[in-house]
Image (cartoon, rainbow, N blue to C red):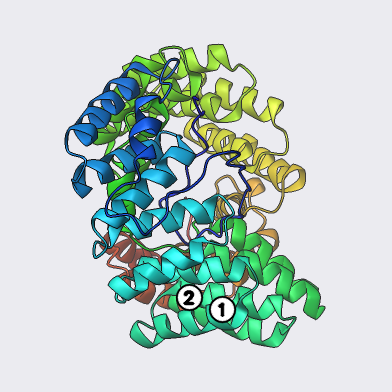
Amino acid sequence: MSLHARGRRSVNIGIVVLAIAIAYAGLGYPGLDTPGPDPRLAAIVTDLELAGTEPRVETKLRALIARALDAPESPEAWGALGMNLDVHGFDSEAVQVYRGTIELAPDEFRWPYYLAIHLHEGGYPEALRWFERGRELRRDYVPLLIRHGQALLDIGELDGADSTFTVLLEADSSLAVAYLMLGRSFLARDDLEGARDWLLGGLKVDPQDGAIHAMLVEVYRQLGEARDSELSRIRARLYSQPSGIDDPLYSELMLETVSSRGFLMRGQAYLKSGQPGLALREFDAALEARPSDPFVLDKRGQALQGLKRFEEAVEHHRAAVGLLPTSLVPRLNLASAHLWQREVAEAVAHADTARQLHPTSAQAHLSLGMYTMVAGDRSAAIDIFRRGLDDADFDTRIATRLAWLLATSVPDELRNGEEALQLAMAVCEIDGYGVPETLDVLAAAYAEVGRFGEAVTIASEARRLAWVDRKSNLVRTIERRLGLYAAGRPHRE
């Protein structure tokens, strides 16, 4: 029986994955009292239906099946097969092969760990048994503890989850994900103050943890603190990255996939980590299997942009847009590639089309406004940013750029110091007055309304934070503006 590949989970384990039940009708599991893999395993993998799978997947699985059948007592051979059945969507077969591999190598940590993850994501409470088995074998593996705690939370075993995450924090108090999970546990108990305290503790570790801000939205809402709830909602959108921690063993599992989806996922991970060359290699492999997939074409274009091969990038994004003419991301990526080609008019045109197609998209307004600034029309950029704040949810990036234009633009009729000051203060309140770039904007707004003492104070703090962040160019830029403010003069762009 051929099973379609299920949607793979993220490598970042800070995201709390909701269990999805999958029925394994008629597929029994081997017992644990036999001396090796249950004899049924050979029949299962021998009869495995591979027709319809991608050629790379079929070739690899056939080779691994042959290897396992040739070495029936080899845990490495069966384990490698189990991993590949897992990542390529043969769910029930993967479970049975993992179980057989555990019997062959009862002291090896990987196999109960992978089995526990697989069962947890299938919605099976039995996953807890294998997480516990893994903890017996390797108590110091932090990703296991985090996953085990999440599994306990998912079935309402709050005390066990609390104990697990407390152990983690005792070993390493810098794990933001542990604070997040403890906040989730206390929220499940309706202990709102306790949940808030744990989540705020996590923000002391990582102020830009989007998952913690997202949970605080609900905590503050239930506490009746509407203003703090709204601020948390904006911060959650601004800081979209969830809590997470590296899991080398899980990464090893994911490297086994040779499906187009696997190549695509790895390519995206390489893009995110700033490795466009490696990303391009993965996207090439995905494109070989799916040559007309607009998503793969668009991602390959992004990798080409990262390699500064902008002409090729334009071609790929244009092909993606041709296949998905109303989609936002390929259109904006095409605009970006045109801009890098110094084709500003084309960039503005595509960004404007994106805004018309998606009028509530903050990113579309932001891109159009920025490209219009590059084109030299500050007045039009101001109008675009204002409209973006009206049509889309409040976006700090738009507000920051609008505040800067209103505080520093020439000619005089473009400036509005009071509006700039209100916007800059709103942004700084959202980011906790801890971002040097937005403090720099706030200082310029203070100077524009003639409050030079406050401008000097804020700019000095912006310089200090930029120095702490090792942003030497920003430090020098702020120092030049500080001289103006100290002399009672505003900055003009």
Toward the right, the furthest residue is 224
Callout 2: few (<14), some (14-19), or many (20+) C-alpha neighbours within 10 Å?
A: many
Callout 1: few (<14), some (14-19), or many (20+) C-alpha neighbours within 10 Å?
A: many
Question: Could you tell me which residue is drawn at 62 percent across and 27 percent down?
Answer: 354
Q: Do callouts 2 and 1 mark residues in contact (Cβ within 8 Å)? A: yes
Compared to residue 396, the image places residue 489 above or below, namely below
Judged left or right of residue 311, residue 374 is right
Amino acid under disc 2: Ala
Q: Which mark is residue 182?
A: 1
Residue 46 visible: yes
Compared to residue 354, the image places residue 240 above or below, namely below
Judged left or right of residue 95, residue 105 is left
Q: Which residue is mark 2?
A: 178
| Residue 166 image point, x, y percent | 47, 85
Quarter of the image for residue 357 reads top right
Residue 436 visible: no
Question: Could you tell me which residue is drawn at 43 percent across and 24 percent down?
Answer: 296
Compared to residue 316, the image places residue 93 above or below, namely below
Q: Which of the pair 355/423 is nearer the observer?
A: 355
Judged left or right of residue 120, residue 220 is right
Q: CA distance from mark 2 to mark 1?
A: 6 Å
Q: Which mark is residue 335?
A: none
Q: Which of the pair 234/81 is nearer the observer?
A: 81
Q: Which of the pair 169/487 is nearer the observer?
A: 169
| Residue 239 image point, x, y percent | 53, 59
| Residue 53 image point, x, y percent | 42, 20
Question: Could you tell me which residue is drawn at 47 percent across and 60 percent down?
Answer: 491
| Residue 155 image point, x, y percent | 63, 67
Amino acid under disc 1: Leu
